Image (cartoon, coloured by chain):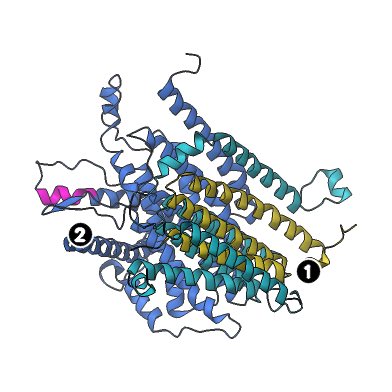
Chain colours: A blue, B yellow, C cyan
Amino acid sequence: MSWPEFWIVVLRVILTFGLLLVVTILNVWAERKILAKMQSRIGPSRAGPYGILQTLADGMKLFFKESITPRKVELGMYVLAPFLAVIPAFLIFMMVPWGRPFMIGDHEVTLQGADLNVGLLFILAMSSMAVYAVILAGWSSGSTYPLIGGVRATAQAISYEAAMGLAMVAVVMFSATQGDGGTLSLAEIVERQSGTWGDLSPALQPVLQFVPRWNVFPQIVAFVIFFIAIVAETNRAPFDLVEAEQEIVGGFHTEYSGIRFAMFFLAEYINIFSMSAIAATLFLGGWNGPTFDGVLPGFVSAVLPTIYFLAKTYFLVFLFFWLRATLPRLRYDQLMQLGWKRLIPGALGWLIVSTLVISFRQFGPPWS
Amino acid sequence: MIVSAGYYMALAAALFVIGALGMLLRRNVLVMFMCIELMLNAVNLTLISAGRALNDLNGQVAVFFILVVAAAEVVVGLAIIVAIFRRRSTASIDELSELRG
Amino acid sequence: MTFSAWISEPINWIFLLVGLVVLASGFRVVTAKNVVHAALLLVAALAGTAGLFLMLAAEFVAWVLVLVYIGAVIVLFLFGIMITRAPTGQDEGLDSEKKVVPALLSVGVFVLMAWGSIDAFGTTLVGATGDPISTELIGESLLGRFVIPFEVVSFVLLAALIGSITLARKDLTPIEEEEGRRV
């Protein structure tokens, strides 16, 4: 690897990291503001214009607060758990392409932390690691409510991961028909969603030429299942039984305070953003969109894809906030029923349907 | 110069032996289960390094099958352990000798 | 090849480091008194193994290992430990008394296996670089040559699923059975 390439990799990682941090800090503020509007309150309004610096102020406060360590904790794991929450959350976002590749001299810079051949598998692996933070925090706290939260989290994560994975499989299979062979690389999956559906079907050209070639249109069922599953995976309302305040005080982070609590809090918001980003990448075409090359100045059309990506992701993030403001928390048995009796059979059924359609289109009807 | 496949396999052998030793010495059902996983992974490592050394795909395919079967085994095994715990609260394998003839 | 020549390569440093992590955590799994600690050390051992897979250019299998083992199997272990209220503290007197014979036996087996593999493959060098076997080839092999084992394995999984549900279900009392209620 030559030196310019090395610096490009460093640049990519730093840019991705920076983007994630900035949007996460904004997300915390955005959620409070949006929830406040939905409940006819004002929300944070003191720190900075519209209270936009509220998160920083809260962060400073938590940073300088004492991190109380209860006497009955298992110290090593108690300290380790917050880090385990943050690291997978960051690594997941490293796989997401968040802008169109551009050239510096004769070196191509892809706006993505890293492009693995098996990117989707990596994302699944990392999102399944996230449960360790919760279960370890719950267990090592040496207290009853955190333990209940930890056990709930495990069952929930295992149940909804299956549905999430199956929905991903359906997309990967569909995406394989859109280009040359199957792929698990997110950059490739995004590129296969460029253009409109009109390019493919001449008969319906007049109607379909305005419909972008996103996977969400043929894979709408997979999208719905995937979205419900990621809401459950990130332990957000209405699936926030892990930290249900009214039932188990605060769940797994009851015994945490100060900067350690802040890390759990941060991890939750990073996860919301990265998971929404993955949903946007898989189903909503990632950074694809009209860039008006040649019409607009070059700089603008280079930045537009990133704006499209952020707009799509923020739409999904907004859905997360909306759900929290609208729906009451599910009961534990309802959670399990939804996961095992609705989502997983639904995802399997959709997988079969979509396989049949794909093979029908590729090989013709079986009687021929 | 790079690592030779034989060293990977020697490492796998060491891991396997550690797992086997655990099976022989420990009497806690859950720990014994974990030792089985260690041994299975040592075998996986051997298969992968042999596949790499011989430039053969089938090593990885075999590992894939081992992973699937191991997952099935853990599911059933843990279900049995949970059922046992429900009846009698012990972790020792020696006390589970009802079926001895 | 002398040891000093071997150790001067960075890749061998990585191999040694990862190998030591794997062996040390594997050893601690076996000796740990606390079941939860054992499970977490097993995570370390498996993560190290996945790292070695990556060094052997088996990308797909490495991440499947992380996904299936670290992400599901050990989480299940922890779940099992926590819902059964298993004795997670010290469990003295649970271990076998006779330690000498198994230890000698294990060392013997290790020497035999290590000697055999270094004798057979000691000169076959494998690098982390070079052409990795692609996921596509594995997929084609699984659904081509190995399609029947693949289907059989899927039946094994189904059987395991049904079996574990049957085992884990609470038995119904006669009254409940009469009412047809599930608990």
Rendered residue at 53%/48% (across/down): B64
Segment tinted magenta in the rendering: A298-305
Rendered residue at 72%/47% (across/down): C163
Q: Nearer the viewer, residue A21 or A3?
A: A3
The x, y position of residue B20, in whole percent, is: 65, 65
What label does residue A5 carry, if any?
2
| Cα–Cα span, label 2 and label 1 | 58 Å
Q: The disc labelled 2 sits on which kind of residue?
A: Glu
Secondary structure state at the residue bearing disc 2: helix
From the viewer's perspective, is residue B41 above or below residue A180? below
Foreground label between 2 and 1: 2
From the viewer's perspective, is residue B83 above or below residue C162? below
Q: Does residue C106 belong to the magenta stretch? A: no
Q: Chain of mark 2?
A: A
Residue denoted by label 1? B90
Q: Does residue A303 belong to the magenta stretch? A: yes
